[in-house]
Image (cartoon, helix red, strand yellow):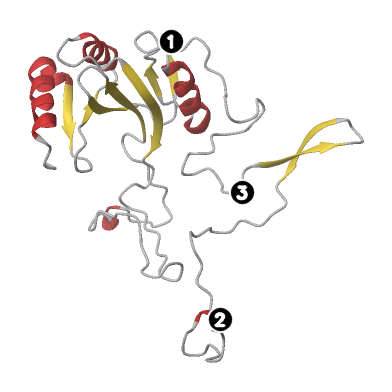
Amino acid sequence: MTQLSPKLEALATGIESKLGSSLTRHDSSPGELTYIVSPDELVAVATTLRDDEAFRFEMLMDVCGVDYLSYGRAEWDSDSATNTGFSRGVHRGQESEIEDPDTKYSPPNRFASVYHLLSIEHNHRLRIKCFCTDNERPMVDSVVSIWSSAEWYEREAFDLFGIVYVGNPDLRRILTDYGFIGHPFRKDFPLIGNVEMRYDPGKGRVVYEPVSIEPRTLVPKTIRDDNRYDPDLKDKTDA
């Protein structure tokens, strides 16, 4: 487990003694406290974290979706794209579990809904993560009744990841067009999208058309051979 500050260790001790088996501590970045909560326990745990005087997480700062498709398996080799190269974290030794490399891998729990909480009274921050049990129709209970700010956050996760928040009073797309096809932050969504949209002056309306660009892989930075950036080849008389 990642080493926590004494303040966070005290918070973790209080949470685990109060909620017990309702949640599981998850190892995360240094200085952060994260718990995994099952969908059945999410609303009860969230209510306790908000109302208990020892916690008082009265503010929901964000709700975001995560798609774990190919997590720990897919690697992005980009030595030619940066000075040092980098790749995604891969769990070595698992590649052999897939006999056919072209077989699409799907983890047992592909989608997760993540909640970032803040206690102003105690100056604590906490992250809870809830995995959806159905990969085809990811669903989790809404927490709008606990934190009203969740309404728009849940709409964003629904729009971008397709996670359905049961009980959200206004679960509509919030960033994409009403006729948009698919969910653009899913790992299997094509980078070029499914359709192109433009305004047609002749028809006087927006029209959808097949994508006309070729798919390509984007990299953060491309290093090209250029004499202007090579000190050994640069004109010595240059100011």
**Label 3 is placed on what type of residue?**
Ile
Mark sitting on residue 167 = 1
Q: Residue 227 lies in what quarter of the image? A: bottom right
Q: Residue at x 56, y 81 (%)?
A: 228
Viewer-proximal residue among 206 and 101: 206
Q: Which of marks 3 and 1 is nearer the N terminus?
A: 1
Q: Residue 36 lies in what quarter of the image? A: top left
Task: Give how far across and how far down residue 88 sits, in percent.
Answer: 34, 55
Q: In this view, does 222 lie to the left or right of 108?
A: right
Task: Give how far across and how far down residue 34 sits, in percent.
Answer: 22, 32
- Tell which residue pokes out farthest to the right in this image: 202
Decide: is 99 above or below 2: below
Quadrant the N terminus occupies: top left
The residue that disc 2 covers is: 228
Viewer-proximal residue among 82 and 89: 82
Q: Residue at x 17, y 19 (%)?
A: 22
Task: Give how far across and how far down residue 236 sits, in percent.
Answer: 52, 91
Q: What element carries label 2?
A: helix
Mark sitting on residue 192 = 3
Q: Earlier in the sequence, mark 2 or mark 3?
A: 3
**Label 1 is placed on what type of residue?**
Gly
Task: Give how far across and how far down residue 40 sits, in percent.
Answer: 27, 16
Number of the front mark, 2 or 3: 2
Q: How far apart are marks 1 and 2 (CA)?
A: 59 Å
Viewer-proximal residue among 28 and 167: 28
Number of the front mark, 1 or 2: 2
Q: Give yes or no for contact between labels 2 and 3 (Cβ–Cβ under 8 Å).
A: no
**Label 2 is placed on what type of residue?**
Arg
